[in-house]
Amino acid sequence: MDILPVIYALLHLLVLQLLGKLTALASGVVTSHNSEGNWAPPSLAMLDGCPKSCGILSFDYPFGIGSRCSRGPDFYLTCNDTAQPPKLFLHDGILEVIEDIVVGTDGISTYNPGRFIYTMFQCTIPMKSGVRVYNLTLKPPGKSFSFLHTLLNITGCDLDVYWVKGNASTTMRVCRTTCPDHGITETGARETCNGIGCCRFVMDSIVDTVELKFVHDQNRSNGRAHSNGTSLLWDRISITSYGSDMVWNIVDQPNCLSTMHNRTAYACISKHSECFDVGVASSNGYNCNCNQGYTGNPFIQDGCSSDKGYNPVQSKARCTRWCGNISMQFPFGFEEGCFARDQFRLNCTNVTSSTVFWWGRQVIDINVDAGTINFTEPESVEMFLENSLFVRSGSSLQWVAANLSCIEAQQNRSGYACVSTNSKCMEVNAGEAYMGYHCKCSDGFQGNPYVQSGCRDINECLQPNSCKEICHNTEGSFNCTECPYKTQYDPFKMQCTRTKERTLLLGIIIGLSCGFAILLPSFSSVLLIRRWKRNVQQQLRKNYFQKNQGLLLETLISSDETATENTKIFSLEELEKATNSFDPTLIIGRGGHGMVYKGILSDQRVVAVKKSKVIEQSEISQFINEVAVLTQINHRNIVKLFGCCLETEVPLLVYDYVSSGSLSEVLHADASDGFSLSWGDYLRIALETAGALSYLHSSASISIFHRDVKSSNILLDVNYTAKVSDFGASRLVPIDQTHIVTNVQGTFGYLDPVYFHTRQLNGKSDVYSFGVVLVELLLRMKPVFTSESGTIKSLSNYFLQEFNEGRITGIVNSQVLEEATEEEINTVASLAERCLRLHGEERPTMKQVETELQTLQTERVKSSQADPRNEEPMPPRPLTRRTISTRQSSVLSGESQRRYSLEAEFMSSASIPR
């Protein structure tokens, strides 16, 4: 029996050899570079004079401009120098490259998924009268490329957009557009892209061809003709991709094994390079890396060289150290010979401006003493986390000179970074793992430890209060000596002055002064003390305002006209007056993110003032940016944020006051509370909540993931209209990202199990939480409850088991059974089940959830109008005590096995702190 695996392995090897020969024959023409048709291995001398950049973007062989500088037609690039800034395109002239093209690594990464190129494209299709169906086929620029992740925005009127997959074997509608208003413009539609004149969808799978079908629904147009020139929405279909990830590989051989038998056009030609397979299949091609310990380009001869490590000698005599008003010190630099290693090279787009780029990311400053790099967009530094010299630290990127201990670094003095006489080596840890070392000036010195004589002595005697005696500065320190006899230290003159003997006249003056001081009215001293306290408080508030980035928020407000109208920075005095100095009797809520007070502003607006918990200083800038964005959100079903106060240690947020409590209080109220809402009201509240979350995900100026969707965060106003609240855990997400990695936050019972385990937050995490809210509406049970046997149960897990076994009507609340039709119950239950699916890609988007609930609400209204008995709306009625049926109780007590193992593990670890 042991010989069977050997036979299978031999057969597999024979098949791979045959495939390798066939692929080599098919690719021989494509990879030829000279007139004889034989592929010439590229070298540094051969590529001399070939462009390596276009504007701020860089690239390297096998990519190049022209046939001499690239491996073949697939890898031709074009640079449009007339554009400002210059634009780089793949050889089809359609796909624009928007980030540097990386062709090699340092051999450190253990996972090689292939190489990626980040592109964007735009195209339009003219619409013709009487034509209903339009098609678009977008192919990669050669067999070496595949589409991986593509976000598409489609603008046009009354369109159904279909994604055609697998040679038209599968057609799936992905989005729809409508144009109810003749006045809508293409620009206005693209800003929100919520289905009104524009819709969007994300294609996450690897495909070789993007094929779309657009069906123009003329019935929805109601006989409207094309536009009269005021808008292009009725005249054309515009397709725009914002950030399309493409995978590129070498495809002249199906895999690395086949290259061993046919080296005619083998790409990994550098001495110290290696081949690695890409993808799960064995025929997706291959790619190249430099071996561990080597860096460079594995696609050219002698392209991989041993890592020379850190070079402490600046070989160029005069280096540019300023870009605008930003100073960059060694070991970083702009020019060859001005930086210590290739990873520390910067790019200054214009010496007269202040724009500095590092690997395509805009730099604010580099602190050589702290060993950090700060960016305009901190989230964009995630791509460097696999590089052993850099690690994410808060909102900055921390760097080291080399991946060595201090002892190892000091053994090689020619490559030792701490060259200043008064410098010291500091070892850096990244979490629990050792990262490397960086340099600091010794105590008593300041400056740049990476250059000769860069650390200079600090004169402590020039600093006030360093010494209450005579101060003597020394190299790296200072000391103090007592003043001579009959002298005393004058802190203002910072020297010893002679003590004057008291005379009779001095005694008389002192006596009169003391007598006069006793006669001063006592209220004068009280007045001075009060004024002093008021000045201290004003200074303290000013300091808090600066510490909390008040100037940054003022800048954001002044630069945005809409923000000027909607955003207000409140003073602490104004909020103290509104809340009666934060009277405890005005507390209306306590939550995981802070305490909420009710208040009345001077303009008689009733507001809710949220006193948040302590915010890390490193997160203040992000907090200010989120306030600036959230204040611009204007949605009828989202609690309005009026502004904030930055004059306290912890910033205060000012929201619109919502008077009727939360959905959770109404759902789980006792019978003695006196009223409940009808099923129709609950269905409307669910629709309004879904619409608000859909707006946050895809219709706001920047995507917002709520991260704590639950019934207690759905407030109800005086008309019982839903208002989504509590954005304390929310995260803003750039439009070109599908998810972000965060610390897990949320409420057990509502928390997405996949997010709990992977820490990758996306819009489908909010969909899961909303699914739990739908189950609450059906069952009127809390998300985590105790069964009759005393076991703690997950409501979502219990609902899924009953639903899959076809017993949904047996667990639905009695009021729901009385007021809802069987079709409505099954529709809502089915929607909740899809929201609670374990895999996020199987869940609907919030926009799809909103559409299904809107359809259900519309059908309910039609049936109510058709039935005369339903002409009068049902008023809120007294709550009735409900009990779980005997059948339901037996399920709760007898449940022995759960279907969803990942969610079961999540519930069992609910008490473990994260």
Image: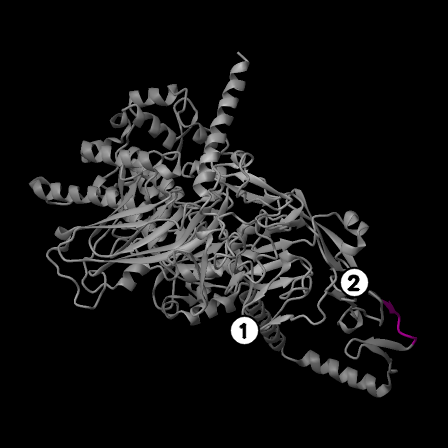
For the magenta stretch, what is the residue range? Answer: 479-485
Looking at the picture, how far across and down is residue 521, in whole percent?
A: 63, 79
Is disc 1 placed on a helix, strand or loop? loop
* The C terminus, quarter of image: top right
- Residue 228: x, y in percent? 16, 67
Find residue 677 and report its image quarter.
top left
Secondary structure of the residue carrying numbered label 2: loop
Tell me if residue 498 can be seen. yes
Q: Which residue is drawn at 24% across and 39% down?
A: 878
Does 708 sit left or right of 535 as displayed? left
Q: Which residue lies furthest to the front in this view?
A: 36
Q: Mark 1 highlights which residue?
A: 353
Tell me if label 1 and label 2 are in contact, CB under 8 Å.
no
Residue 804 highlighted magenta (yes or no): no
Label 1 crowd (10 A; few <14 / some 14-19 / many >=20): few
Total of numbered circles in the picture? Answer: 2
798 vs 502, nearest the viewer: 798
What distance separates the C-alpha of mark 1 from that of mark 2? Answer: 31 Å
- Report the residue that reaches farthest toward the top: 1
439, above or below 543, in the image:
above
What amino acid does circle 1 point to? Ser
Residue 485 falls in which quadrant of the image? bottom right
Amino acid type for the residue under numbered disc 2? Ser
| Residue indicated by mark 2 | 420
Judge the density around disc 2: few (<14), some (14-19), many (≥20) Cα neighbours within 10 Å: many
Of all residues, the one furthest to the bottom in this rendering is 505
